[in-house]
């Protein structure tokens, strides 16, 4: 050593260290609150104990800045030292950040047991199963179109992981939820943003749905990228889904697309007739309530829903709802009954291969039923009646035809978060208003 180390010397070196590392701290609020306020406590056995304000500061400094501070102080002292951050007992300190428990938010109905594996999705299924092996890819990125089982797979992973490792912390995150959370944090200021980062640093398994909706949100992408890198570097398992493969994501930085591709990327292709038929037959076994569908009826349903498994399931629910209320138990359901309970279709080609809905037609029919002009429903007018009809149109396009939120929003000049809120409002009303529920059910049958 070239100098005697005591508290006064260390405090001088600490002040110089703060100046040296200033350029490495991009968040001014964090710098002022937690770096500038660092003070020497004592020096013992080559350990420098520094006082920090709270657990939040201690965790961030230890995880993200300790190596830099160790190196800089050691350089000035010409001696290797180990910095230890300790909390000051200060009642005026900022609130300790959110600490997560191992209670998760998974949908318990989505498991591997009821995930039907066929040719089109078996690669994604095997990728999901690989997580439970000692050495697995990280991150795993699963892409594919709407309604192909990506969300089911995420929840199945989480449920299996929680069963095998009950002490581990798991979080399923719809990216819309993350966006709203970060927007609120940005309003609250730098410390709240750091708290969000700290929250997501604590999970052992992160399941992130619909990553494509981060498009064009540069500030939120930056925060997400920080969380992503920290967790990957600290062996948190990340599984993400998107409607596009990483290299096809629009308005994402190349560094993000590169990192998303650094583990294992899997695409779920569109299912063929045999795959959809197998899935439908399994679902009939699970939820068929004793009713029997003829082979022709199964083929009819499959050909009308070959693009979307979620829509297929909704179609089956509609048929079974009709059967429970209009047919004797264990009745045989043929094509004629399906046409009766769902819709009459005169176009032979549509019967054979299904159809794509015209959103404008849906909007016009619902608007007509409420005696309002469809142009007003598609406008920005916010009267109570117009807003209700607009939300019902959104609900129909999502629940009957499984249209993506952003596509629905494009017809009403709204973003996808507004569409989700509108649909949720109708779902809440339907739980309480049987009259509206019956009216909408009949209306949907005619679309």
Image: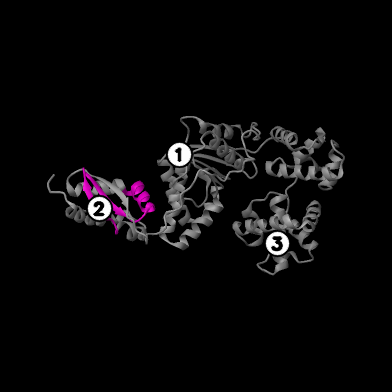
Q: Which residue is mark 3?
A: 390
Mark 1 is surrounded, within 10 Å at the Cα level, by few (under 14), some (14 to 19) or many (20 or more) other residues, namely some
Measured as percent of width and height from the top left, residue 249 is found at: 52, 47
Q: How many marks?
A: 3
Q: Which of the colour schemes (rainbow, by chain, secondary structure, one colour) is used?
A: one colour
- Front tag of 1 and 3: 3
Q: Which residue is mark 1?
A: 262
Q: Residue at the spot x=37%, y=60% of the render?
A: 91
Q: CA distance from mark 1 to mark 3?
A: 42 Å
Mark 2 is surrounded, within 10 Å at the Cα level, by few (under 14), some (14 to 19) or many (20 or more) other residues, namely some
Q: Relative to 161, does residue 24 appear above or below in the rendering?
A: below
Considering depth in this image, is 76 or 372 the residue closer to the camera?
Answer: 76
Element type at marker 3?
A: helix
Q: Which residue is mark 2?
A: 41
The first of marks 1 and 2 along the sequence is 2
The first of marks 1 and 3 along the sequence is 1
- Left or right of 416? Residue 97 is left
Q: CA distance from mark 1 to mark 2?
A: 43 Å
Element type at marker 1?
A: loop
Query: Residue 64 colored magenta?
Result: yes
Magenta span covers which residues? 36-65
Measured as percent of width and height from the top left, residue 435 is found at: 80, 58
- Left or right of 422? Residue 33 is left
Element type at marker 2?
A: strand
- Left or right of 12? Residue 141 is right
Q: Which quadrant of the view contains residue 126?
A: top right
- Front tag of 3 and 2: 2
């Amino acid at each position: 050593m070239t100098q005697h180390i005591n508290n006064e010397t260390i405090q001088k070196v600490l002040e110089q260290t703060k100046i040296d590392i200033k350029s490495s701290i991009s968040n001014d609020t964090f710098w002022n609150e937690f770096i500038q306020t660092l003070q020497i406590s004592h020096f013992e056995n080559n350990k420098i104990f520094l006082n920090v304000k709270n657990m939040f500061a201690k965790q961030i400094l230890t995880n993200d800045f300790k190596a830099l501070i160790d190196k800089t102080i050691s350089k000035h002292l010409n001696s290797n030292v180990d910095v230890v951050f300790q909390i000051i007992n200060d009642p005026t300190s900022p609130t300790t950040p959110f600490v997560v428990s191992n209670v998760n938010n998974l949908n318990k109905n989505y498991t591997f047991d009821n995930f039907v594996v066929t040719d089109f999705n078996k690669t994604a299924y095997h990728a999901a199963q690989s997580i439970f092996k000692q050495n697995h890819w990280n991150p795993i990125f699963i892409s594919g179109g709407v309604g192909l089982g990506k969300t089911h797979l995420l929840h199945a992973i989480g449920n299996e992981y929680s069963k095998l490792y009950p002490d581990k912390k798991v979080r399923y995150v719809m990216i819309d939820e993350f966006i709203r959370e970060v927007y609120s944090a940005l309003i609250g200021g730098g410390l709240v943003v750091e708290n969000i980062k700290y929250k997501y640093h604590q999970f052992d398994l992160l399941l992130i749905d619909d990553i494509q909706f981060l498009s064009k949100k540069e500030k939120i992408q930056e925060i997400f990228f920080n969380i992503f890198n920290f967790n990957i570097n600290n062996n948190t398992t990340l599984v993400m889904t998107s409607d596009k493969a990483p290299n096809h994501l629009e308005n994402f930085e190349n560094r993000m697309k590169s990192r998303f591709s650094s583990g294992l990327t899997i695409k779920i292709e569109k299912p063929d007739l045999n795959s959809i038929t197998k899935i439908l037959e399994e679902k009939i076994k699970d939820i068929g309530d004793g009713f029997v569908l003829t082979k022709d009826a199964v083929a009819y349903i499959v050909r009308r829903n070959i693009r979307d498994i979620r829509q297929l399931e909704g179609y089956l629910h509609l048929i079974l709802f009709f059967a429970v209320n209009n047919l004797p138990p264990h009745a045989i359901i043929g094509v004629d009954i399906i046409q009766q309970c769902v819709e009459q279709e005169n176009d032979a080609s549509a019967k054979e291969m299904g159809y794509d809905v015209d959103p404008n037609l849906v909007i016009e029919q619902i608007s007509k039923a409420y005696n309002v002009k469809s142009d007003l429903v598609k406008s920005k007018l916010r009267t109570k009646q117009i807003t209700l009809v607009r939300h019902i149109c959104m609900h129909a396009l999502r629940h009957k035809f499984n249209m993506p939120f952003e596509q629905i929003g494009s017809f009403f000049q709204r973003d996808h978060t507004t569409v989700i809120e509108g649909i949720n409002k109708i779902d809440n009303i339907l739980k309480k208003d049987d009259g509206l529920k019956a009216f909408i059910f009949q209306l949907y049958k005619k679309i």
